[in-house]
Image (tube, rainbow, N blue to C red):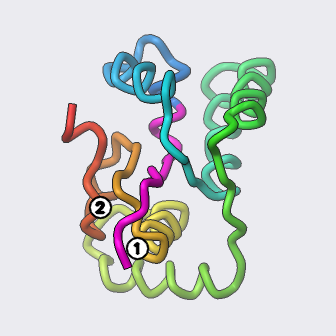
Protein backbone atom coordinates (compact mmCIF):
# COMPACT_ATOMS: atom_id res chain seq x y z
CA UNK A 1 0.00 0.00 0.00
CA UNK A 2 1.38 3.40 -0.99
CA UNK A 3 1.78 6.26 1.42
CA UNK A 4 -1.29 8.43 1.68
CA UNK A 5 -1.40 12.13 1.00
CA UNK A 6 -2.56 12.71 4.57
CA UNK A 7 -0.65 14.73 7.11
CA UNK A 8 -1.05 13.80 10.76
CA UNK A 9 -1.60 16.91 12.91
CA UNK A 10 -0.23 16.90 16.45
CA UNK A 11 -1.13 19.34 19.20
CA UNK A 12 2.13 21.26 18.79
CA UNK A 13 1.28 22.13 15.17
CA UNK A 14 -2.06 23.62 16.23
CA UNK A 15 -0.28 25.56 18.98
CA UNK A 16 2.39 26.87 16.62
CA UNK A 17 -0.28 27.92 14.12
CA UNK A 18 -2.41 29.77 16.66
CA UNK A 19 0.41 31.30 18.72
CA UNK A 20 2.24 33.95 16.67
CA UNK A 21 5.06 34.01 19.23
CA UNK A 22 5.91 30.35 18.52
CA UNK A 23 9.12 30.01 16.49
CA UNK A 24 7.39 27.55 14.13
CA UNK A 25 4.39 29.84 13.53
CA UNK A 26 5.46 30.98 10.02
CA UNK A 27 5.81 27.38 8.81
CA UNK A 28 2.45 26.24 10.18
CA UNK A 29 0.70 29.42 9.02
CA UNK A 30 1.89 28.56 5.51
CA UNK A 31 0.90 24.87 5.82
CA UNK A 32 -2.56 25.54 7.26
CA UNK A 33 -3.20 28.15 4.52
CA UNK A 34 -3.39 25.38 1.88
CA UNK A 35 -3.53 22.06 3.72
CA UNK A 36 -3.58 18.57 2.26
CA UNK A 37 -6.02 16.09 3.80
CA UNK A 38 -5.34 16.20 7.55
CA UNK A 39 -5.92 13.58 10.23
CA UNK A 40 -5.80 13.78 14.02
CA UNK A 41 -7.46 12.23 17.06
CA UNK A 42 -9.87 13.40 19.77
CA UNK A 43 -6.92 13.05 22.18
CA UNK A 44 -5.03 15.77 20.29
CA UNK A 45 -8.13 17.98 20.30
CA UNK A 46 -8.54 17.51 24.07
CA UNK A 47 -4.84 18.16 24.69
CA UNK A 48 -4.96 21.34 22.57
CA UNK A 49 -8.10 22.68 24.23
CA UNK A 50 -6.54 22.08 27.65
CA UNK A 51 -3.28 23.76 26.62
CA UNK A 52 -5.03 26.93 25.42
CA UNK A 53 -7.25 26.96 28.51
CA UNK A 54 -4.27 26.72 30.91
CA UNK A 55 -1.90 28.94 28.92
CA UNK A 56 -4.44 31.63 28.03
CA UNK A 57 -8.14 31.39 28.96
CA UNK A 58 -11.49 29.84 28.07
CA UNK A 59 -11.96 32.23 25.15
CA UNK A 60 -8.71 31.15 23.53
CA UNK A 61 -9.58 27.48 24.15
CA UNK A 62 -12.89 28.03 22.36
CA UNK A 63 -11.04 29.71 19.46
CA UNK A 64 -8.98 26.55 19.15
CA UNK A 65 -12.13 24.40 19.04
CA UNK A 66 -13.61 26.74 16.42
CA UNK A 67 -10.49 26.24 14.29
CA UNK A 68 -10.91 22.48 14.54
CA UNK A 69 -14.59 22.76 13.55
CA UNK A 70 -13.89 24.87 10.46
CA UNK A 71 -10.81 23.00 9.24
CA UNK A 72 -12.52 21.29 6.31
CA UNK A 73 -9.83 18.80 5.29
CA UNK A 74 -9.46 17.54 8.88
CA UNK A 75 -10.57 14.01 9.77
CA UNK A 76 -10.82 13.19 13.47
CA UNK A 77 -10.22 9.47 13.87
CA UNK A 78 -11.89 7.78 16.86
CA UNK A 79 -9.66 6.19 19.49
CA UNK A 80 -10.88 3.01 21.13
CA UNK A 81 -9.49 0.03 23.03
CA UNK A 82 -7.64 -1.33 19.98
CA UNK A 83 -5.77 1.95 19.46
CA UNK A 84 -5.01 2.29 23.18
CA UNK A 85 -3.59 -1.26 23.24
CA UNK A 86 -1.39 -0.56 20.19
CA UNK A 87 -0.24 2.73 21.73
CA UNK A 88 0.57 1.03 25.03
CA UNK A 89 2.76 -1.39 23.10
CA UNK A 90 4.58 1.57 21.56
CA UNK A 91 5.02 3.18 24.99
CA UNK A 92 6.68 -0.03 26.17
CA UNK A 93 8.82 -0.29 23.03
CA UNK A 94 9.99 3.32 23.33
CA UNK A 95 10.06 3.50 27.13
CA UNK A 96 13.34 5.44 26.94
CA UNK A 97 11.47 8.32 25.22
CA UNK A 98 9.21 10.98 26.83
CA UNK A 99 6.10 9.82 24.94
CA UNK A 100 2.60 10.49 26.18
CA UNK A 101 -0.36 8.28 25.33
CA UNK A 102 -1.44 11.01 22.89
CA UNK A 103 1.95 10.75 21.16
CA UNK A 104 1.85 6.96 21.02
CA UNK A 105 -1.67 6.92 19.55
CA UNK A 106 -0.42 9.40 16.95
CA UNK A 107 2.54 7.16 16.09
CA UNK A 108 0.18 4.21 15.73
CA UNK A 109 -2.24 6.17 13.55
CA UNK A 110 0.54 7.45 11.29
CA UNK A 111 1.76 3.88 10.75
CA UNK A 112 -1.69 2.42 10.10
CA UNK A 113 -2.74 5.20 7.73
CA UNK A 114 0.73 5.56 6.18
CA UNK A 115 0.74 9.32 6.70
CA UNK A 116 3.20 11.09 4.43
CA UNK A 117 4.20 13.73 7.00
CA UNK A 118 3.66 14.62 10.63
CA UNK A 119 2.82 18.21 11.46
CA UNK A 120 4.49 18.50 14.85
CA UNK A 121 7.33 20.25 16.61
CA UNK A 122 7.86 17.21 18.86
CA UNK A 123 10.91 15.47 17.45
CA UNK A 124 10.14 12.14 19.11
CA UNK A 125 7.13 11.80 16.79
CA UNK A 126 9.53 10.78 14.03
CA UNK A 127 10.20 7.49 15.91
CA UNK A 128 7.80 5.66 13.60
CA UNK A 129 9.59 6.82 10.46
CA UNK A 130 7.12 9.49 9.33
CA UNK A 131 9.04 12.70 8.58
CA UNK A 132 8.22 15.91 10.42
CA UNK A 133 7.13 19.05 8.57
CA UNK A 134 9.71 21.06 10.55
CA UNK A 135 12.47 18.96 8.97
CA UNK A 136 11.27 19.80 5.48
CA UNK A 137 11.10 23.57 5.89
Residue density around tag 1, few if under 14, some if 14–19, many if 20 or more, within 10 Å = some
User: Residue 55: which quarter of the image?
Assistant: top right
Name which residue lies at 43% across and 66% down.
Answer: 110
Q: Assign a secondary structure to mark 1.
A: helix
Q: Position of residue 84 (x, y in %)?
A: 60, 80
Q: Is residue 80 left or right of residue 34?
A: right
- Residue 32 vertical placement versus 112 (above, below): above
Residue density around tag 2, few if under 14, some if 14–19, many if 20 or more, within 10 Å = some
Inspect the magenta stretch and tell me whether residue 85 lies in it. no
Name which residue lies at 67% across and 63% down.
Answer: 77
- The reply to whether dot 1 and dot 2 touch (C-beta < 8 Å) is yes
User: Residue 67: which quarter of the image?
Assistant: top right
Q: Position of residue 69 (x, y in %)?
A: 77, 36
Work out whether residue 95 or residue 75 is closer to the camera in this orientation and state it: 75
Inspect the magenta stretch and tell me whether residue 2 lies in it. yes
- Residue 135 vertical placement versus 15 (above, below): below
**Would you name the residue on which mark 1 appears?**
111
Name which residue lies at 36% across and 66% down.
Answer: 3
Tally of marks = 2
Q: Position of residue 15 (x, y in %)?
A: 51, 30
**Would you name the residue on which mark 2 appears?**
130
For the magenta stretch, what is the residue range? 1-14
Structural distance between the alpha carbons of marks 1 and 2? 8 Å
Instruction: Name, please, the residue furthest toward the top.
Output: 20
Q: Is residue 119 left or right of residue 65?
A: left
Amino acid sequence: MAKSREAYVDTSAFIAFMDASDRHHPLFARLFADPPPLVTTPLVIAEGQGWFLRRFDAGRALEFLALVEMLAPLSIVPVGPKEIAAATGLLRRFSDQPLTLVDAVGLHLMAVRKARVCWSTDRHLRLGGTPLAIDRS
